[in-house]
Amino acid sequence: MGIFAIRLPDVGEGIAEAELTEWHVKPGDIVKEDDVLAAVMTDKAAVEVPSSVEGKVVELGGEIGDMLAIGCVLVRIEVDGEGNEAASVAEPEPTPAPKEQKAEPEPERGDKPAEPARPVVKTGKPVARAKNTKPLAAPSVRARAREEGVDLRQVPGSGPGGRISHGDLENWIASGGIQQGSVKRGKNTGVEDVRVVGMRRKIAEKMAISKRQIPHITIVEEIEMEALEDLRAALNRKYKDQRPKLTLLPFLMRAIVEAVREQPELNARYDDEKGIIHRHGGVHVGIATQTPNGLNVPVVHHAEAGSLWDNAAELARLAEAARDGSIKRDELTGGTITITSLGALGAIATTPIINHPEVAIVGVNKMQMRPVWDGQQFQPCKMMNISCSFDHRVIDGWDAAVFVQKLKLLLETPAMLFVEG
């Protein structure tokens, strides 16, 4: 018998460490060749590590959430014949049994310690109060009544004009006069500790970098959506059974492509360490997507080369892959500008966080009917706000405003989205 050490493999792209996110085995398990031993995460890509041998698991090389160096021992497996480690794993020394302690008798489960009787406070004679009038009481008395679930209108007061004192309230409670149906809300003092691992850790690290390193400037603009929504509905009706359904996002992607054509500094990534802005010719649009494991940002590469329907189909494919976990690493990297949308859950306005190292993000807010003044009267109109955040280190406020107004123009007059040149 020998010991075979399975090491954390090099997962590529110069990564030096990976986070251990899941064990598929435990000590004592029998594994076969190609059985999955563990899952690790690098950046936003999850990688499963298979066994290269058959045998019994004798030692695990870490705990969930640990950051493991590439090449470290992940699992040790006992195999027939010689292993790849000279020494066997030492058996752990037995832990001495703790000395017996005489257990103190516990009260039976059904027995509860009796509550001490409430003291009866001497008060004056109750004073009659007119029906349905607001009871007189000090704020502290009212607060005490709320804690105990007491309706003060039912408590007779002994003070001037029927004013309810602390003594009146305590006597009412002690006599069992709490209103039927009133429920005293108990205090929940429980605390659940949830370790931040896997995707949630990556999201936390990325958000912290973005907010810590990027000075954000956010501009919110109102967009009239009637023309675009009419066009979208007409195209979906015409090509219902022939082409993918169009949502708002392909139109917004086209508008972004046109806008950055005139402002290439917005379709960029900023290298903080080298002080270099990388302006890209291709427009690679990241789409913030919520998945069961957290936020992912799949990227539609070369959105400038795709039609509305091409980009709609790619959006749907990437979103599905992100949600079912089949998305590839290169489909999550290389973005140059990002769109974030909460759809119907969106608010009137948001302040989206830039996807570092990009320099701009476009946030889509909720579409709703609003009254709009047409010069003579108010008319109901479909309106939507967009919230755009920019890296103020490399994008000036003026340039940011020009970009937002360009998006507004293109979305409010969608025919311009199809004009070449």
Image: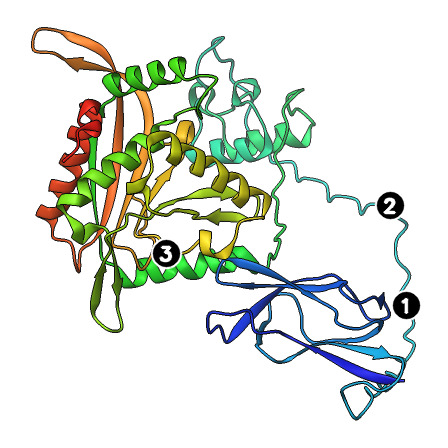
**31 relative to 258, above or below:** below
**Where in the figure is residue 8, as x and y percent of width and height?**
63, 74
**105 relative to 263, above or below:** below
Q: Quadrant of the rendered structure where residue 75 is?
A: bottom right
The reply to whether residue 200 is in sight is yes
Which tag, 2 or 1, sits closer to the chain's start?
Answer: 1
**What residue is shown at x 72% (from left), y 41% (from top)?**
117
Q: In the rendered structure, which amino acid carries the disc numbered 1? A: Ala
Which tag, 3 or 1, sits closer to the chain's start?
Answer: 1
Residue 334: mark: 3
Q: In the rendered structure, which amino acid carries the disc numbered 2? A: Asp
* Mark 2–mark 1 CB contact (< 8 Å): no
Which tag, 3 or 2, sits closer to the chain's start?
Answer: 2
Whole-number angstrom distance, CA of label 3 to CA of label 1? 64 Å
Instruction: Kindly state the secondary structure of the residue where label 3 is placed.
Output: loop
Q: Quadrant of the rendered structure where residue 412 is?
A: top left
Q: Which residue has dot 1 on it?
A: 103
**What residue is shown at x 18% (from left), y 56% (from top)?**
392
Left or right: residue 93 compared with residue 196: right
Q: Nearer the viewer, residue 235 or 108?
A: 235
**90 relative to 125, above or below:** below
Instruction: Please state which of the two labelled residues, at mark 3 or mark 2, is closer to the viewer.
Output: 3
Left or right: residue 171 compared with residue 335: right
Q: In the rendered structure, which amino acid carries the disc numbered 3? A: Gly
